[in-house]
């Protein structure tokens, strides 16, 4: 099932606040929390997730994490 909507919570103002979270909406209207991430290491835009499956979206995070670790 494909992702038709995505939103990302705001970046934390301090290290004591929660990490940003990616929330998605699937084709059937189901809304899910996909993952959180460290915004000082990787960055996402909601449009990057549109048309992907959940598995592809998790792979996108993996690829960005890997690129950050290699830099």
Image (cartoon, rainbow, N blue to C red):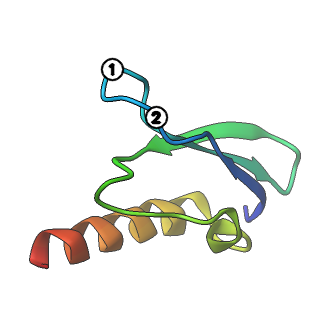
Where in the figure is residue 42, as x and y percent of width and height? Answer: 36, 62
Query: Residue 23 is drawn in which quadrant?
Result: top right
Outermost residue, top direction?
16
**Residue, disc 1:** 16
State the SS at label 1: loop
Compared across the picture, whether 71 is left or right of 58 comes to left
Q: Identify the residue at horizontal 42%, vertical 35% (top origin).
A: 19
Image quadrant for the N terminus? bottom right
Outermost residue, front direction?
13
Front residue (pair 38, 13): 13
Compared across the picture, whether 1 is left or right of 35 comes to right
The vertical placement of 52 against 28, above or below, is: below
Front residue (pair 32, 44): 44
The vertical placement of 3 against 60, above or below, is: above
The answer to whether marks 2 and 1 mark residues whose Cβ atoms lie closer than 8 Å is yes
**Residue, disc 2:** 12
Q: Identify the residue at horizontal 64%, vertical 67% (top origin).
A: 49
Image quadrant for the C terminus? bottom left
Marking on residue 69: none
Give the crowd class for mark 2: few <14, some 14-19, many >=20 residues within 10 Å.
few
Q: Identify the residue at horizontal 28%, vertical 59% (top origin).
A: 41
Q: Identify the residue at horizontal 47%, vertical 43% (top origin).
A: 35
Query: Residue 50 is drawn in which quadrant?
Result: bottom right
Compared across the picture, whether 62 is left or right of 44 comes to left
Tell me the distance, in whole angstroms, between the alpha carbons under discs 2 and 1. 8 Å
Where in the figure is residue 34, as x and y percent of width and height? Answer: 54, 44
The vertical placement of 30 against 16, above or below, is: below
């Amino acid at each position: 099932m494909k992702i038709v909507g995505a939103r990302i919570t705001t970046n934390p103002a301090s290290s004591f606040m929660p990490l940003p979270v990616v929330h998605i909406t699937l084709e059937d209207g189901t809304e899910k929390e996909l993952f959180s991430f460290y915004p000082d290491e990787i960055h996402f835009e909601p449009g990057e997730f549109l048309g992907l499956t959940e598995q592809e979206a998790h792979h996108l995070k993996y690829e960005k994490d890997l690129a950050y670790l290699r830099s």
